Image (tube, rainbow, N blue to C red):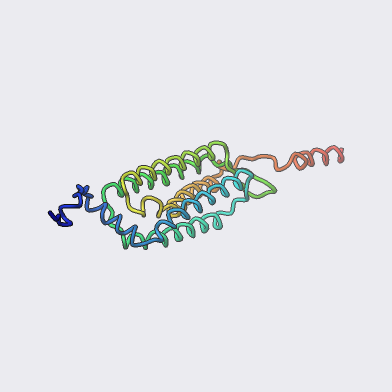
Amino acid sequence: YTLSLHDALPIWKRERIPPHMTHQLATAAASPGNTLSSIISPAVTLAIILLLVVTRVRGRRLEPARLLVADLILIAVGIGESVPLLHNTTLHGTDWLIGSADLLDSLIIGTTRGFTVQLYQRDGAPWYRYGPATVALWLLSILIRIALAAIASARHASPLVTGGDLLFMLGLALLCQNLMIVRRHSHPQARPSHPVEPADAALPCTCRMTRR
């Protein structure tokens, strides 16, 4: 007896994939750059955060215009990375939920960090630096983002939510933080009077003793 090819080969049961997952898998396969972007974008974001924390813990001069312009540039770069993904992606319920949680993380924690940044005077100019609470809030924000990325990956969310919006959300969080810093700086009570240097503080006393 001869068997046909159809009878000889086993027939496997194919799992049915939801339509939105099929579209997202096809989009990811059709655009190889998504995989590279999903690796580069988190690495660049983490490098920026580490650089910010290290340099701001030591203290930097407060220049409001320069501070806010840098945030706007970062947001623009993030939008430039996100727009191509929007053209090839259909957002579903999971994408909206994770994206909303990420947006709230940027707005709320970013604004809260602005309250924890220390403002002080140095050489007659306003300075600012990150305190322990500021660094702790940065770590909390990173942990929340990692958790959201894990949920997005498990739920097969779109590439836009799993990492394509990182730079945009980072820029938005920094903008909220720095707007609060600038607002506190412009308020009189936001600039406590600290002695510039111990030697400078003792100088008027020395002069008065010399005059006597």
Image quadrant for the C terminus? Answer: top right
The image shows residue 172 at horizontal and vertical percentages of 44, 52
Q: Quadrant of the N terminus?
A: bottom left
- Residue 128 visible to an observer of this rendering: no
Residue name at image x 31 percent, y 61 percent: 88
Left or right of residue 109, residue 60 in this image:
right
Q: Residue furthest front?
A: 1
Image x and y of residue 115, in percent:
50, 41
In the image, taking residue 81 as reference, residue 135 lies left or right, namely: right
Between residue 32 and residue 192, name the one nearer to us.
32
For this view, does 126 lie left or right of residue 173?
right
* Viewer-side residue, 139 vs 189: 139
Identity of the residue drawn at 85% across and 37% down: 209
Q: Is residue 37 left or right of residue 132?
A: left
Q: Nearer the viewer, residue 117 or 33?
A: 33
Is any part of residue 5 visible from this angle? yes
Image quadrant of residue 2?
Answer: bottom left
Question: Which residue reaches farthest left?
Answer: 1
Decide which of 36, 61 is in the foreground and name it. 36
Return the x and y of residue 132 as percentages of the image width and height: 56, 36
Q: Quadrant of residue 76?
A: bottom left
- Count of labels shown? 0
Please provide percent x and percent y for residue 11: 18, 50
